[in-house]
Amino acid sequence: MGFADLLEEVSPWLIFSVIQYDYHVSQVDHDAAVPSTPPHQVGGFGRYQWLHVTLISLPGLMLASQNLLNNFVSGTPVHHCSLPANFSLYNLSHHQLLNVFIPLDSSGNRLDRCRRYAEPQWQLLAANNSANISQLQTEECVDGWTFDHSEFQATTVSEWNLVCSLHPLKQMIQTIYMGGVLAGAIIYGGLSDRFGRRSVLIWSYLQLGIFGCSSALSPSYSAYCIFRFLSGMAVSGIILNGVSLKVEWIPTKARTLVGTLTSFFVTFGQMILAGLAYWLRDWRKLQVFVCAPHFLFFAYSWWYSESARWLVLNRRSEDALKNLHRVARINGKPEMIDKLTLEVLKSHMSKEIESSRSSFTAYDLLKSRGMRRISICLIAVWFSTSFAYYGLAMDLQRFGVSIYLIQIIFGAVDLPAKLLALGMLSYLGRRISQATCLFLSAIIIFANILVPTDMQAVRTTLACLGKGFTSASFTTVYLYTGELYPTAIRQTGMGFVSTMARVGSMAAPAVLILDEVFPALPSIVYGGAAVLAGCFACFLPETLNIPLPDTIEDKLILGFRIRISRVNI
């Protein structure tokens, strides 16, 4: 591909790519590098690229906090109905007052969170009391709620009483945020193709800093949801344009290593979030602390160089040449400045300029029977993987252990999960790896339903394994999707099917509301979706050690040859 090996263009369909795409995109581009091209002569992966990749990847430490922030900012403290205003007139201990005014819940082990006795039940203080508690009249919490502050000093739940009948509003915050992520992908992905990656990335840093910190000043629930939506849009702008700007300045051969190393920024970011949340128990302080660093990212982002490939394709060859000369100086290759001229640049970009005039839509994915089958199967896999992943990661309190500890464990489990996925992909193939990860995650989710709530160690272990396998499924589907689609529609296909990951992440918090109907119902839904996706994955063709096709026709011919070879065997 020549010049495109260093400055790979990301098509408008990448506006639908999901949060982790930048950490795996290197694995779906296998085009051969041409060492003699000017970009490699200005330093290849030199000093500039190291600084460039590091500075763009650093915000990943805080972006993980944005996705999982609702676990802590909207944590639900232990609570019960507030006692009557004149309860202090009674010369009783606090424990005795609770026995008189607050009934036990259906389990009989803790105070009811949403009901209180309509009248004080003094007889319950007697040592030989034999009253039938189930027959006593109760009422809703007419005087509000009293929250325990040992785990959280303050959250949005305690701030706006998002409990009992208003409990669904807690999960709605995360759904609205994910809706902002999807909207931001559509808006900022398109703007980056028009105004450049660097400009939109700089604005996204500023937007997340402003609206993220403004969330901490929200006077009402509605205002907070609006700010979180706008923050989600900025997160998409940072990820998508960070992906483009990072990939378009890195040689092809270095992308696999860079993609692997930078993926751990998000992993460590999940563990950092647990430490920050443990230190800052007030939701407003935590909100500011995870958003304020983006002002720093905004300040140094002006150092970035705009993608030279984007500049050339938008008839700004002179600016592209200046950026290449700047990179050559930083990389210690000043002798290349005279060799790399405007004529040389345009000659190496002629093929890319010509190919950029061709565009593909989702319709091109569905015209042929083979592409239609692949697309339908991948839609199911992308949706279910994200659906199960965020279903496990967004309700840490249900596991009954310290929410801060389990957040660290959930972050750490991604490390072996990614290594496991890479090993399975190399030795078992793509299809078996994809289906196995989905089926195993489903089995673990279902098994956790059967474990008693008092066996917290077992439940936590199974939950970590389930998240690990869904993380491995994510790693697999990124690579698999890029190999299944031919070069002509690869990025269109990636964007089309990965849109369903955003839909899955939006739906996951909403399903948690079903635990009010039946506690095991959300897990049944998450596990069932993973089983269904695993079945769809079995119908995908294997791509291990198979050359990547360039056109839809090549894909069909290659698929025909694979079927013939299996018959001969």
Image (spheres, grey):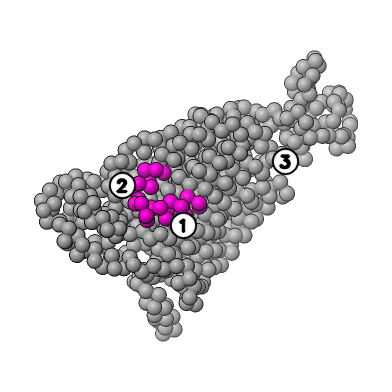
Instruction: Examine the image and state in which quarter residue 265 appears.
Output: top left
> Circle 2 sits in a helix, a strand or a loop, which is it?
helix
Indicate which disc residue 224 carries: none
Q: Amino acid at mark 1?
A: Phe
- Tell me the residue that label 3 is attached to: 165
- The CA span between labels 1 and 2 is 22 Å
State the image coordinates of residue 505 (x, y, percent, origin top left): 55, 52
Q: Earlier in the sequence, mark 1 or mark 2?
A: 1
N-terminal of the pair, mark 3 or mark 2, is 2
Q: Nearer the viewer, mark 1 or mark 2?
A: 1
Nearer to me, 346 or 447: 346
Quadrant position of residue 442: bottom right
Q: Nearer the viewer, residue 167 or 203?
A: 203
Q: Residue at x 45, y 36 (%)?
A: 210
How many other residues sit within 10 Å of disc 3, few (<14), some (14-19) or many (≥20)?
Answer: few
Residue 454 falls in which quadrant of the image? Answer: top right
Q: Would you name the residue on which mark 1 appears?
A: 16
Badge 2 density bin: few <14, some 14–19, many ≥20, Cα 10 Å? many
Side of 411 relative to 79 (left or right): left
Q: Residue furthest front?
A: 315
